[in-house]
Amino acid sequence: MSTPRDLAALAALALGACAEPAPDPYCGGFDEPLAYELSLAKLTLDVDDYVPVEGELCLELPRRCDCVPTDPNGFLRVEAPARSDLLAEVHAPGYLTTVLVHTSTDVPHASTLRVLDRATVMILGGAIGERTDRTRGQMAIRAAPAEGGDVTGTVFSLRNLDTGAEERVIYTAGGVPSVDATATDATGVAIGVNLPVGRYEIASPVFATCSIHEAGWPRYDAEGRVRALELVVRADSVTLLDTLRCFGP
């Protein structure tokens, strides 16, 4: 869910070309449209706590569209093409911009998008002794187990596709980020802090056991198993990745 404004925009800037063209009107008119019914809610430590957030969703890939606002209850509806890599941003006052990377299927989609307020970002950074750098981006990933499954001990590797550099992944211990943890706890959560902007791949053996890759562009091996998720990191933003129904080894 490339650079902060994508490679084409950077090339235009470097060459002194004209500004980007105006976006298309309302996100619709795709050959195989899928309805996406989405709700924005605040990301909290209590997953059962639902706090609606008013904001807007701005689709950029496969084409740029006008931003679509939520209603007062945080609900919005957009159309997107089937079987496509989608890239969008979610904006809400007081919250960090959320970068969404998602691959559509051929069925309509409904979900809740959690957004992270800036105060929580500062608290999380303080837990690991990091101050958020607004010229860089943040990333969080969750591998959620199926009922009876266990994702404790999951390990991720994060690679910058633009530079080839391996970036640090920080895991949680007891649900709290810890620089000493070497794998996930039962939450299956890990984060990347103050990452250089660009395109990344995050890999883990657990991806092959997940039946749903809610957020992240799945990339496959020769046998058709998911080997990695591709993502985009942007300045002063957070990219959230989610894989669901993972079974332990």
Image (cartoon, rainbow, N blue to C red):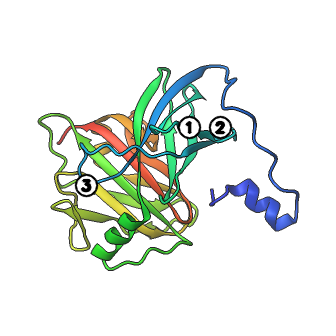
Q: Earlier in the sequence, mark 3 or mark 1?
A: 3
Read off the residue under disc 1: 85
133 displayed left or right of 126? right
Q: Which mark is residue 183?
A: none
Alpha carbon separation for disc pair 3 and 1 = 29 Å
Please, is residue 49 above or below residue 178 in the view?
A: above
Residue nearest the viewer, comparing 147 with 66: 66
Disc 3 to disc 2: CB gap under 8 Å: no
Alpha-carbon neighbours of circle 2 within 10 Å: few (<14), some, or many (≥20)?
A: few
Task: From the top left corner, tell me how far across and down residue 22 is, in percent.
Answer: 80, 45
Task: From the top left corner, tell me how far across and down residue 38 is, in percent.
Answer: 46, 34
Q: Which image quarter is the C terminus in? A: top left
Disc 3 element: loop
Disc 3 to disc 1: CB gap under 8 Å: no
Task: From the top left corner, tell me how far across and down residue 234 is, in percent.
Answer: 56, 60
Disc 1 to disc 2: CB gap under 8 Å: yes
> Label 2 is placed on what type of residue?
Pro
Disc 2 element: loop
244 displayed left or right of 247? right
Read off the residue under disc 2: 62
> Label 3 is placed on what type of residue?
Leu
Among all residues in the image, which is located at the extreme front? 72
Read off the residue under disc 3: 45
Alpha-carbon neighbours of circle 1 within 10 Å: few (<14), some, or many (≥20)?
A: some
Task: From the top left corner, tell me how far across and down residue 99 is, in percent.
Answer: 52, 51
Alpha carbon separation for disc pair 3 and 2 = 33 Å
> Label 1 is placed on what type of residue?
Asp
Alpha carbon separation for disc pair 1 and 2 = 7 Å
Q: Earlier in the sequence, mark 1 or mark 2?
A: 2
